[in-house]
Amino acid sequence: MRKLKLGIVNSTSIDMSYGGVAPFIKNLDPFMRNEYEVNYIVLPASLTRINFIPRRLIFLLYLLFKKKRLNEFDVILSHVPEGSFLVSYGKVPFVHIFHGNFNPMSQSRYWYGRYFMSLFESMERRIISKANLMYTVGAERKGIPKIFNPVLHTVKIKEGESRSGYIFSGRLEKIKNIDRLIEIYSKLPETLQGENPFYIAGIGTQELILKKLVSSLGLEGKVIFLGDLKNDKMVETDSTKKIMIMASSQEGMPMAIAEALSVGVPVISTDTGDIARIVKSNINGFLLPLTFDDEEYIHCIHKIHDDYERYSKNALASAEIFRSETIAAGLIQDINSKIIKK
């Protein structure tokens, strides 16, 4: 009996490390391949290097070019709205996974992104009306169940005393408020800075601006930019750090947080999206309001250092909810029972 053909529509290759979407699909991939004949429709690497046109528009045009191929599958899984929007005009049943709980244009790197907010709202309405199965990575929506970020790796848990430094992992964009994290780090005692460099992993439009800020604060050698790391290397890097620090204005449920917790690294983050479901203050890290002040953030860093083993142990325990095998099994069961057998 032949395996059913599953087409996965994703804006980037699963070899990418950042943005949540690629690692999410990558960690499901081996389990999906066991069940289905899997093929990917992703934006070619050459087109991802075009910076003067929004990638979402490029991907939509690329999918129009590939529309005939989209009709060759038994079912399609999409984690991007522009992908599901186009698929909704075909005859193939599809699964849509909402990446977050906000309009993607609200964090567009292009000044004119706000003018496309209403377009994406209409796209979302169509997806909701046409999708055969839906999930949300962020907070639960009415009638749409939650799906957790699947985490899959073989990285060994490090002893707490062998770890040092703080880590940010993600896209280097304004919405992540990495400049604020650098300024907070600059206010830590010199002894703490000497023992714990601040590592920034990722690429984005703010990279040069952030490096200039580091220079102006005299933090060269203490704030280290790691660039773009492959996912396995990223998780290994996480495992050697004391704390993951984040301060985003908007998120769904960051894959970066799930990965950090999975290697026992406590997390300090702002309370946005669905992070509060996982990060619990004074248990596996701290959750701060978007209006937090710097001294409040610094106090949380000191608190974790003072009782590190407890925070680390709790971080590891809280990551059980992200087991890829369990999440994939539930997704496959839903696809088989609610779409294929209909």
Image (tube, rainbow, N blue to C red):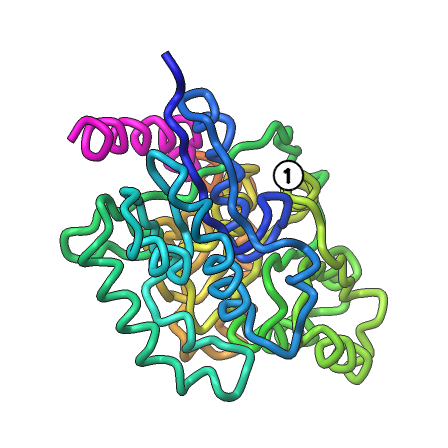
Does the segment drawn in magenta span residue 317? no
Residue 236 sits above or below residue 303 on the image: above
**Residue for point 34% across, 55% down:** 98
Does the segment drawn in magenta span residue 326? yes
Q: How far across and down, in percent of the image, does residue 139 sit?
A: 28, 57
Amino acid type shown at disc 1? Gly
Between 27 and 250, the one lying in front of the other is 27
Between 224 and 88, the one lying in front of the other is 88
Residues drawn in magenta: 318-342
Query: Quick check: can you spot residue 305?
Result: no
**Residue for point 46% across, 45% down:** 69
Secondary element at image label 1: helix
Q: In the rendered view, does 99 fall on the left or right side of 257?
A: left
Among all residues in the image, which is located at the extreme top? Answer: 1
Q: In the rendered view, does 11 fall on the left or right side of 211?
A: left
Q: How far across and down, in percent of the image, does residue 107 sit?
A: 47, 75
